């Protein structure tokens, strides 16, 4: 008979308990999270061209619709609302939508909700044609819809605001500033005011041009990247008070390649310096920054600002979806070399290729549009 000392017997018991605890924790945490991303909680079996979450959790989405005239095949996307309870309703039937009695086609590119989640600024890529003259004109445009489906007409009879893009809402849910490159050099934009009831209300920051801008949630302000019309000098990061047209320089940038995005709490901003490097800057202490080599793509912050999500290609192309931990931001002396981190990406959806994605405002759901048929799937996250 072999006996164990009390001390060794106790040690074996403790080790056994720890092993059970570790295995149990592993089983609870890893498979559960993976399982949530294996089966969607909602599947919209349509050819979805764009979608966006509202602040209240509703989802607006567009569905590709083609129809024929005697000579032309036209596209005019339908627009639908998916309420958080699961009910769907059509807000706009594209085939019945018209523009100035012209031969007209459009595709929905994106949606921007008003802060109160009742008005949607719909970004369109439009084409108008004059069959007799053989002329064709492509242009961005904004369409304003209430969540009831009522079209708003800020320009009077016509419901479209032409040459308008990237709307930045005010807190009053009635006013916005949009970007336009109608009279600016390529890749630069001017700003214009628009009231959804009374129409265009003049220029904002007249005479100045920007490469991009992102609204600070809960405010009438935005962070913009200003650049001169001749591209002299470096890009400058500016805090813009859209109501008073006051501004304050945040930083001079080493470069800018797009993707500017303010965090949900308005304390940080991320943007690409070039096609490889992302810079994150603390808006409360702009000397505190971090740089990561992650490659150019479409960004979104997590709700708690601890992670960044990235579709690793631009806009409407398909690629995998990954996330990165937001690193600690540090202050560096002027003109010093700033290290570029090379974080390991965390692959989502088992490496599934997606066309578009978005996280719900509360961070509980992930919506993706798949390539091919382009159906919209929503996963518990």
Image (cartoon, grey):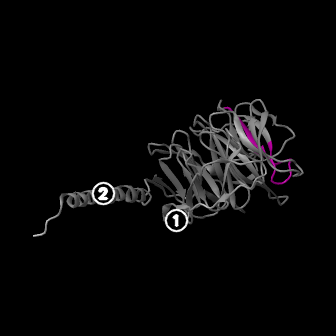
> What residue is drawn where x is 72% and y is 61%?
275
Q: Which residue is mark 1?
A: 352
- Across and down, in percent, residue 170 comes to 68, 33
Residue 360 magenta: no
Q: Is residue 175 left or right of residue 78?
A: right
Please say if 55 is above or below 254: above
Q: Judge the density around disc 1: few (<14), some (14-19), many (≥20) Cα neighbours within 10 Å.
A: few
Please say if 215 is above or below 316: above
For the residues bearing labels 2 and 1, Cβ distance under 8 angstroms: no
Look at the image and give the residue range highlighted in magenta. 174-190
Q: Which residue is mark 2?
A: 18
Q: Nearer the viewer, residue 278 or 320?
A: 278
| Separation of residues labelled 2 and 1 (CA atoms) | 35 Å
- Across and down, in percent, residue 87 comes to 46, 44
> What residue is drawn where x is 66% and y is 62%?
295
Mark linked to residue 57: none
Element under disc 1 = loop
Q: Nearer the viewer, residue 259 or 90?
A: 259
Res 88 seen here: yes
Q: Is residue 278 left or right of residue 15?
A: right
Q: Nearer the viewer, residue 51 or 129?
A: 51
> What residue is drawn where x is 55% and y is 48%?
306
Res 155 seen here: no
- Across and down, in percent, residue 108 comes to 65, 52
Task: Determine the image quadrant of residue 29.
Answer: bottom left
Q: Nearer the viewer, mark 2 or mark 1?
A: 2
- Across and down, in percent, residue 320 comes to 57, 64
Marks 2 and 1, the one that precedes in the sequence: 2
């Amino acid at each position: 008979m072999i006996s164990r000392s009390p001390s060794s017997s106790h040690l074996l018991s403790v080790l056994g308990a720890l092993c059970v605890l570790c295995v149990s924790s592993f089983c609870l945490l890893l498979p559960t999270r993976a399982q949530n991303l294996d089966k969607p909680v909602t599947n919209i079996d349509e050819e979805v061209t764009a979608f966006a979450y509202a602040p209240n959790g509703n989802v607006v989405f567009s569905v590709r619709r083609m129809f024929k005239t005697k000579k032309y095949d036209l596209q005019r996307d339908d627009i639908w609302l998916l309420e958080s309870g699961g009910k769907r309703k059509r807000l706009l039937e594209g085939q019945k939508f018209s523009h100035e009695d012209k031969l007209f086609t459009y595709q929905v590119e994106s949606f921007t909700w008003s802060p109160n989640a009742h008005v949607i600024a719909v970004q369109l890529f439009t084409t108008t044609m004059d069959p007799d003259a053989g002329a064709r004109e492509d242009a961005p445009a904004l369409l304003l819809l209430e969540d009831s489906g009522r079209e708003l007409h800020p320009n009077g009879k016509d419901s479209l605001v032409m040459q308008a893009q990237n709307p930045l809402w005010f807190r009053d849910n009635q006013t916005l500033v949009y970007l336009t490159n109608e009279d600016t050099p390529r890749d630069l934009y001017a700003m214009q005011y628009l009231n959804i009831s009374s129409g265009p209300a003049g220029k904002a920051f007249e005479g100045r041009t920007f490469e991009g801008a992102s609204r600070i949630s809960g405010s009438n302000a935005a962070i913009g990247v200003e650049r001169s019309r001749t591209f002299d000098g470096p890009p400058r990061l500016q805090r813009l008070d859209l109501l008073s047209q006051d501004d304050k320089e945040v930083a001079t940038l080493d470069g800018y390649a797009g993707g500017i995005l303010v965090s949900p709490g308005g304390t940080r901003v991320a943007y690409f310096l070039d096609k490889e490097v992302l810079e994150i800057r603390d808006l409360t202490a702009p000397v505190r920054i971090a740089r990561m080599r992650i490659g150019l793509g479409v960004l979104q912050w997590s709700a708690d600002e601890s992670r960044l999500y990235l579709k690793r290609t631009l806009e409407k192309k398909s690629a995998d979806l990954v996330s990165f931990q937001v690193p600690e931001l540090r202050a560096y002396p002027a003109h010093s070399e700033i290290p570029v981190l090379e974080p390991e990406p965390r692959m989502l959806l088992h490496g599934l290729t997606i066309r578009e994605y978005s996280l719900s405002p509360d961070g509980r759901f992930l919506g993706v549009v798949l390539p091919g048929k382009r159906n919209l799937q929503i996963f518990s996250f």
